[in-house]
Amino acid sequence: MIFFADLHIHIGRAGCGAPVKITASPALTVEGILKECSERKGIQIAGIVDCASPAVLADLRALVDRGDLTALPGGGLDYLGKVTLLLGAEIELGGPQGGSAHFLAFTPSLKTMEELSQFLSGAITNISLSSQRASLEIQEVNEFVVRELSGIFLPAHAFTPFKSVYGNCVRRLAEIGVDFTALELGLSSDTYLADRIHELSNVRFLSNSDAHSLPKIAREYNKLKLIKPDFAHFCKALAGDPENIILANYGLEPRLGKYHRTFCLKCERVVEGAPPVYQCSRCDSDKVVVGVLDRITAIADENEPVHPPNRPPYIHQVPLEFIPGVGKKTLNKLLEAFGTEMEILHGTSLGELEDVVGTKVAENIAAAREGRLALAEGGGGRYGRVKNHQEC
Ligand SMILES: [Zn+2]
Ligand SMILES: [Zn+2]
């Protein structure tokens, strides 16, 4: 069976009102996420990455007691037969030569997530909050998650300038001394960029939203073929099992990502020129935020991607919220007509779209699908955008 999976979703507030990810929307509660995934997004496997917070664990237990969540025999929790919830935690850890990076740990059950929470609580100042720095070695956490808890451990948004392995810690994963089976590409990067690094040929790529609000869920996601939608079968897909497969990665066109190109902090503009750029060509300042494209170009083994034979296709998408003419009202109209965003983006014809939102918007959606929209590159924490007609 085919499932769409977004495995990096944050919690804004716990049910008790306590903040978890302070910068995330309070509408991101466990239930809010599961409803959004099933009712609007068309996501069947949701990874929530703040489950090690005791307040979130309490919410999860309450949903189990109420019967809305049911532990699956293969791991993960079933939400009303509609969505599988995978229990995750985002953790910040220091790199071998300084710098620090975010990692994602997934565990099969509530019990093992409680054990992870316990394990981390001694090494984190405030375990209630999301993505906190733990005073532990990367290898140590990997050992605990993979061996003790039968979980998964992988680098998050692996190329971003802050808090990522390649962006902020090492030039090669081998320097960390952990054999990662998977890595999250992040919004500003894709398979074409990452496959310029040889050591990643045996690593599976995941594309997740890192959503800090409900609308941003599924701006990146994975298409999976699994015998069953549970933790064990997801692990099989990462291990290269022939029956359980990552069929495709769907992700933001990287130029729209917040950190795609180097950004000059003095001019407050994305730099120009062939990557890698470390110095602004306008003002000569080297006070810059290095872009993902610039970083990958600097450390790549190849100028062009070399895809291993098992690498699934990476399909670029422009999320509906980026498309000119698609405001809140239009989006609701589209959802009413077609059900989920997944269906609007991938399952509709131009004619069907035209009937609901008129020719202009329908054509913009079709142009986005086919990669025909002109884009301005993002950088320094600002998203790229679709250029309007005058700029083209
Ligand atoms: Zn992160
Ligand atoms: Zn400048």
Image: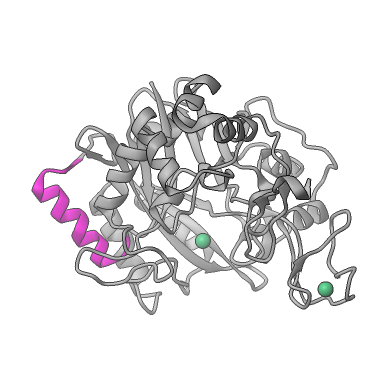
Residue range highlighted in magenta: 52-70
User: In front here: 253 or 80?
Assistant: 253
User: In front here: 147 or 85?
Assistant: 85
Task: Assign the magenta stretch its main secondary structure.
Answer: helix
- Residue 73 location (% of width, % of height): 23, 34
Q: Quadrant of residue 370?
A: top right
Q: Quadrant of residue 159?
A: bottom right
Kindly give the residue lying farthest to the left in the view shown.
66
Q: Is residue 240 visible?
A: no
- Residue 179 location (% of width, % of height): 58, 47
User: In front here: 368 or 291?
Assistant: 368
Q: Is residue 54 visible?
A: yes
Horizontally, is 314 left or right of 24 in the view? Answer: right
* Residue at 63% across, 71% down: 99
Q: Which quarter shows the C terminus?
A: top right
* Residue at 27% across, 47% down: 109
The total number of labels drawn is 0
Q: Which quarter shows the N terminus?
A: top left
User: In front here: 204 or 268?
Assistant: 268
Horizontally, is 228 left or right of 289 in the view? Answer: left
Horizontally, is 30 left or right of 298 in the view? Answer: left
Q: Quadrant of residue 29?
A: bottom left
Q: Is residue 68 magenta?
A: yes
* Residue at 44% across, 29% down: 356
Q: Is residue 240 magenta?
A: no
- Residue 245 location (% of width, % of height): 49, 26
* Residue at 89% across, 71% down: 282
- Residue 312 location (% of width, % of height): 60, 28
Horizontally, is 227 left or right of 200 in the view? Answer: left
